Amino acid sequence: MLSENIRYLRKKDNLSQQQLAEKLSIPRTTLGDYERGHTEPSMDTLIHIAGIFDISIDALLKERLAHLDLEVLRTDNFRVLAISVNDQNRQNIEFVSTKARAGYLESFQDPDYIKELPKMYFPSIPEGSYRAFEIQGDSMVPLDSGSIVVCSYVEQLEELKNDRTYVIATHLDGIVYKRVLINPDKTSLTAISDNPTYPPYKIRYQDIAEVWSYYAHISFTDTKKAVEHAIDERISDIQENVQFIKEQMS
């Protein structure tokens, strides 16, 4: 892991190979060989590298440092965020399909698992941590089952806003996409479906593993037809309720 760690630390500090080579008093080509794993630095150079980046030699040799930096710590009740990066050191947008949900809930903290997830690319997307989730069911009409929601990572629960939509991961309810209402106790939220046939329910903060805020979505159906279908279903529900009330009154 030494070559990978040297390259990662250099890029993290925005140093060119020439700049780091000058700090180490070695030729740039020698540093290039270190980063490609063609040669290994002497003990003196290794100590110098550890000193420049303020890291132990043990960590430099034995730990995958990129993994440590790709974990964003949360509150005591929250977990950590594992991400992956591309060749330009930009974060990937990992895609969590319906089939992958169970495995995701078990392994979302594992950088190696995250790296194996399919990746998506969006041009000109702002810097940040994003993930894409496949929507299942019709609780958030007009988004049909199979639509993909691209979300940005919510670092603090205090950032949640009323009447916004989020993907919420818990081990109790799985991965759900809901509109939220912050409860007065400030220790829980109410998850609300846009489809009124689904009742709202409470999610305690302590049960939340991850929260992702809606950024964009990809739909594979005609939006106009989807909206019309949702309206037709709502009208049908109202008619059934009116008929039921009439029957009860008579």
Image (cartoon, rainbow, N blue to C red):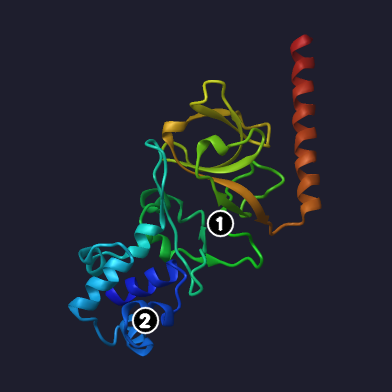
Q: Position of residue 231 (x, y in %)?
A: 79, 39
Residue 244 image-quadrant placement = top right
Q: Position of residue 200 (x, y in %)?
A: 59, 28
* Residue occupying image coordinates x 38% and y 87%: 28
Name the one closer to the observer, 143 or 243: 143
* Residue occupying image coordinates x 74% and y 12%: 248
Amino acid type of the residue tagged 2 in the rendering = Ala
Mark 2 or 1, closer to the camera: 2
Is residue 33 visible in the rendered structure shown here? yes
Q: Which residue is mark 1?
A: 128
Amino acid type of the residue tagged 1 in the rendering = Gly
Mark 1, other Cα within 10 Å: few <14 / some 14–19 / many ≥20: few
Q: Secondary structure at mark 1?
A: loop
Q: Looking at the rendered structure, which numbered label has been put on residue 21?
A: 2
Is residue 139 visible in the rendered structure shown here? no
* Residue occupying image coordinates x 56% and y 24%: 183
Eyeballing the image, is 200 above or below 216?
Answer: above
Please indicate whether residue 62 sits to the left or right of residue 4 in the image: left
Q: Looking at the rendered structure, which numbered label has been put on residue 238?
A: none
Looking at the rendered image, the quarter that the C terminus falls into is top right
Residue lying at the far left in this picture: please name it: 43
Looking at the rendered image, the quarter that the N terminus falls into is bottom left
Mark 2, other Cα within 10 Å: few <14 / some 14–19 / many ≥20: some
Residue 197 image-quadrant placement = top right
